[in-house]
Image (cartoon, helix red, strand yellow):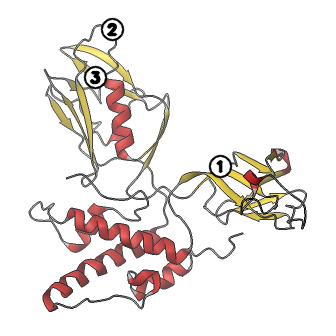
Amino acid sequence: MASVLAANALCKLATVKAELGVGIETPDTTQDAAIERMINAASDAAESFCGRKFNKATVTSERHRGSGTHRLVLNRVPIVGSLTSVTFDDATVDSASYYVEDAVAGIVWKDTIWKAPEAGVLGSAASDLVPHTGERLYKVIYVGGYVLPASGEAVIGTTNMRVPLDIGGTDYDVDVTAATYSGGTAMAAALQSALNASPVGVSDRDFTVSFDTTTEKFTITKAAGTFKLEWLTRSTNSIGAILGASTAADTAAATSHVMADVYAGTRDLPYDIEHAALEAVVALFRSRGQSRESGLNVGIGRGLGGGVLPDSVLPVLEKHRRWWID
C-alpha cells in the first residue's frame, strides 16, 4: 500500500509504531495508513497552533510591507544559507545592502531601513500584497525550514556519489548525479536513473530501486541476472554509507540487495517538536480505540490545534510559535 504520509509530517511512521508497540513481535502493516493519517492530522494541527510551516522549502512568493526599521522578519525559519533575491516593487534590491542577521529567528538586516508603505504611492499590481491596492511591497525568495524526520536530506557530490557495481565479473563505477536530495524516494529515483544510464559494455540495464518508508531502507533489484555491490574493496567516493549499506564487506552475487541499515539522510527538526507530534499521534491512536469501545467520540485536548493536540504538548509547541509575522 502506498504511503499517505504528507510532506509536512513531523514524525515517522516507524517511530510511532515503535512507541505503540505495533508490529514489534510480528510484522503488521494493517494500521499503517490510519497511523499516517493521524501523523498528518497532528502535523497540520501543530503548524496551525504555531502559525508556521516547519518543513524545508523554497519560498518564492513571500511578500512583506516594509517595517520602517533595519530588520525584516521572514516567515519560514530557520533561513537556510543566504537569500536568493529581494525585490521592492519588482525592482531588485542590492544584495550587498542586506544580510541574514539571525537565521533561526528569520531576521534579515538592511543597512538602510526596509521602507514602510507610503500612502497614495502606486505600485505595480504584481507586487501588491492585496492586488491593485497600490502598496509597494518587498518580495523575498529564499530557502527556509527544517529537514523533517520522514524526509532526510542527502547532499551528493564527488566524494560520495559512486555505486561500485560488478556485473558478471566486470566492474562499473556508477555515479549518481551530484545534487541535494530530499527524502529517500527522491534518492531512490536518482539512483535508479544512474544505474540504468547504460555505460559502454552493458546492455542489460534493468535495475529498479525502491525505498521503504516504514523500514527506511533501499532495495536495488535487477530484472535478469545477478550483480554485486563492492562496498569494501571499491570504497573510494562510495555512496554506500548514505544508502545504509554495510561497508564492511562486498555483497555476494544476487538479483536483489536490501541495504543493511536505514537511510542516513540528515534531519534537523528540533527533537521537542518531533516528540510533541509523536505524543499527539499516540493520543489520537489511543482515543480512537476508546471511541470504538465506548461508542463515544472521545476528544483530546481542549480544542486548541483543532482539538487534535493534547494539552501536554502545548507548552512545548508554544516555544515555537511565530509572533513576528509581518
The disc, 2 or 1, on the residue closer to the chain's N-terminal end is 1
- Left or right, 267 with respect to 325, comes to left
Residue with the mark numbered 1: 81
Q: Alpha-carbon distance for marks 3 and 2?
A: 14 Å
Depicted 45 relative to depicted 135: above or below? below
Q: Alpha-carbon distance for marks 3 and 1?
A: 35 Å
What is the total number of numbered labels drawn onto the structure image? 3
Residue with the mark numbered 2: 200
Q: Which residue is drawn at 31% across and 43% down?
A: 244
- Left or right, 307 with respect to 285, comes to right
- The single residue placed furthest to the front in the displayed view is 132
Q: Helix, strand, or loop for circle 1?
A: loop
Depicted 150 relative to depicted 176: above or below? below
Q: Residue at x 33, y 38 (%)?
A: 188
Residue 7, image x and y in percent? 42, 56
Residue neighbourhood size for the residue with mark 2, other residues' Cα within 10 Å, grouped as few (<14), some (14–19), many (≥20): few
Q: Helix, strand, or loop for circle 3?
A: strand
Residue with the mark numbered 3: 165
Q: Which residue is drawn at 52% across and 55% down?
A: 56
Q: Which of marks 3 and 2 is in front?
A: 2
Q: Helix, strand, or loop for circle 2?
A: loop
Q: Which residue is drawn at 42% across and 91% down?
A: 302
Quarter of the image where the C terminus is located = bottom right
Q: Is residue 234 visible?
A: no
Task: Tell me the kind of residue under disc 1.
Answer: Gly
Task: Tell me the kind of residue under disc 3.
Answer: Leu
Q: Can residue 53 be seen in this view?
A: yes
Dividing the picture into quadrants, the one containing residue 297 is bottom left
